[in-house]
Amino acid sequence: MEAAAAAAAAERQDFAAYGQRLTSGEGGFFFFPIRHHSPACALHLAAALAEIRPRAIVLEMPADFGPLLPLLSHPDIRLPIAIVSVADGEKTSDERLPVGYWPFSATSPEWAALRLAGEFGSAVILADRESSARLAAARSEKKGEAGEDGEEAPRQDEAGQDDTAPALLTDEGQLAYSHYADGLVKRLGVRDFNEAWDRLFESRAAEKDWRGFFRDVGIHCALSRLATPAEEIAADDTLAREACMRAAMAKAEALSGDGPIAVITGGFHTAVMIDPPAEEAKLLPEARSAVQTKSYLIRYTHDHLDRINGYGAGMPSPRWYERLQQRIAEGHDDPFTEAATDVVIDLTQRLRRDRPNFTPPLPSLAATVGQAQALADLRGLQGPGRAEILDAARSCLLKGEDPRSGSPLMEALLTELTGEGIGEVPSGAGAPPLVEAVRSRARALGFRIEDGTERNRLLDIHRKPRHLAASRFLHVMTLLGTGFGRCLRGPDWAGGVATDVLFEEWTYRWSPAVESRLVALSIDGDTVERAADAVLARRVQALGEEGQAKNAHAALRLLMIAAQAGLARSCGALIAAIGPAVATDPDFGRVAVCLSMLDNLQRGRKALGFAGMPGPDELRLIAYRRAIDLLPDLETAKDEDVPRYVDALATLNEIAEAGAQAAEDEQPLDLDLLDEGVAALIDADLAPRAAGAVAAIGHMSGRLSAEALATRVIGPLQFSVGEPPTRVEALVGLLAVQPALLKRTPALLERLDLVLAGFDEADFIEVLPALRLAFTALAPDETDALAAVIAQVKGSDLDLAPRFSGGLTEAELLANARLNASLAELMQADGLGLWLEEQAP
């Protein structure tokens, strides 16, 4: 036991000595282990640099960001901002892909270092690998994972994960999610690593001993590294990056001048900066990557800074830490309590503005601050932090609510802690013209992009040209993959759903992802249209490269997307490719789906920008004729294909009937072609469902009598041909093609009634499930109409008229108006008056 205790004491002394070495100026170097966006690290680093006045600063940032450093001192910058690095695609046909973000917040230690370097005249050497090399490593790692998983890529016409989404170059998951961090969380009895970090380090932000602070941070990070398996460290490009950082230290050491050198890196790397591994000579900096990159400054948001935490790279609730840092910088005696009070006051103002019925009384607000102070005292902290504010709010502000479930008040508090700000970059920062073009277009169309708040927009796309232009802008931003807007409701032209809806409703917000995506696409052009044309051309090319050059369905979906984005005039090549693909498609069901999409496109040609263009109408004729040519496939259809083919026949019949009467600017569909094709199948050996569908169309064309139709459709049920579900299949086919026939054809209904009346109870129960399933094909109004006919035939006095008439008396209207006014008064009294106000589009 004594030997173990002595060993533990010696180990503690070794760590303490290591921590002292970091800030002793050993060999002319001062080492500052940091956590990204930590105000405590930023404040202590600023104090350290002001004292030691380094001649050079070695900073962990990609070396190719150097040309942007002068811009970072521009007075017009408003934080948060980020550097986004954009790389060329792997193939010449690829678009430029975002590499990653390097965000700067008001609490970034790197930001403090760069500002003070300019003030002191210190040289700045960016020490990390170039972003192009990090991209190459990330691509290799991703390809390796894909090969191991063996997952197939999504189809071209299906939504897949965005592989172009930028990564965070400030990732510090090795620090936040190490085995040591897990043990620390359990030892301290806290909820997560962020709370543990706050307890140990952010609570010391107002202290004056920067040496003691970085000593303890350095020891903490060294323990994290020791607890991380060597193979895990070697699995990515960590070792190569650290070799570059050491090379940068040597470069700084060679600079002339007096003064020490400050080495500022993520805490996980510091241990090998002061004590490089013996095998480092093998890790020479690699040759320049073949991938070319270019970097830009973009605006960033508090919300995205908070999201960084989810990837182990930064601090949660960035606005809280900004408040805390500001109060400490102002020299307040109790900055933590002052910052907590600011949060509670701002929360109250937010609730009064947005949710007045959730605004707590003043005593509860005062109790919240007091409770946060008491929790800080209980936990041995200098003042309340983020965790104490949240715990106090749950205790003092939630009345009768389960704190584990969603609470509007807690949501507002989290928003207040996170912040809603968006940064600003100087106009001369060199942003690509495409970014400014999109911003100008967005503002001109009434979109608010000055902050990162999510907003709704209701667009009257058929009656207001400006609203149609706004819709096309939102759709083109979707085509570009920016994530700027999301359509909540509106016409679905590809699926033929709600095409008569007059309005589209969108939610939108400007975010760093929008800006970085536009930066990535800037090589394609300086306007929205040019960039969209280039993206569209690449997607058309990708159809061929992915073996879908003859997939008319995928091409048509792309055509619909492009049309809604206002690119109808740029779709010539796509339209030219769709024609041959449809004309040679061997699948009857797929061709019918394409025909339906083209029919939707033709009906919506004005809204979609195809008015006066012959291409889509010609494609509709090609698809119609191809579907007619494939009708004989019903005779040889596999059992699993029969339901799909019958649905396709129903679609073909519906479109043919509607298209026989053409408008002035379109060509009519020849209904005789369908009648002739169906006539050839009337006596063919078809599956029961297909036979019922063909018989229904044959009867409507006059080629099959009502009695013959009844025999073909009801006969299997009457004579018990096959299993119970099979007996009803012909009826299912008829209902799929023309459900009104059952109501309009007395012979059919009489035969069905006769057969059902002749069933005994056992037979009826046996066939009932299949019958019920068959009649689910009827819409509610069709069911009502059929029930009315049956009631009339049976001589029933069943009243199936609508329960509510369309007309109201004057007295009823006045009574309803009085009731509406009373309800409005009650809602106002309950603080729900905002619900009655119409939201501006």
Image (spheres, grey):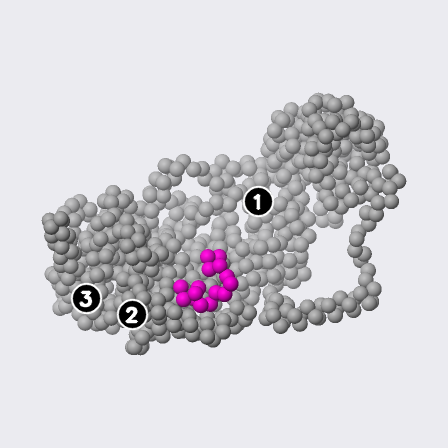
- Mark 3 burial class by Cα count in 10 Å: few <14, some 14-19, many 20+: many
Q: Amino acid at mark 1?
A: Arg
Marks 3 and 1, the one that precedes in the sequence: 3
- Three-letter code, disc 3: Arg
Q: Give SS at disc 2.
A: loop
Alpha-carbon span between mark 3 and mark 1: 62 Å
Q: Position of residue 588 (x, y in %)?
A: 63, 32
Q: Quadrant of residue 147?
A: top left
For the residues labelled 1 and 2, the Cα–Cα distance comes to 60 Å
Q: Nearer the viewer, mark 3 or mark 2?
A: 2
Residue in the foreground of this view, choosing between 684 and 268:
268
Q: Is residue 370 left or right of residue 789?
A: left
Q: Is residue 202 left or right of residue 560?
A: left
Under mark 2, the amino acid is Gln
Q: Which residue is mark 2?
A: 382
Dividing the picture into quarters, in which one does residue 584 lie? top right
Q: Identify the image quadrant of residue 617.
A: top right
Q: Secondary structure at mark 3?
A: helix
Mark 3 lies on residue: 211
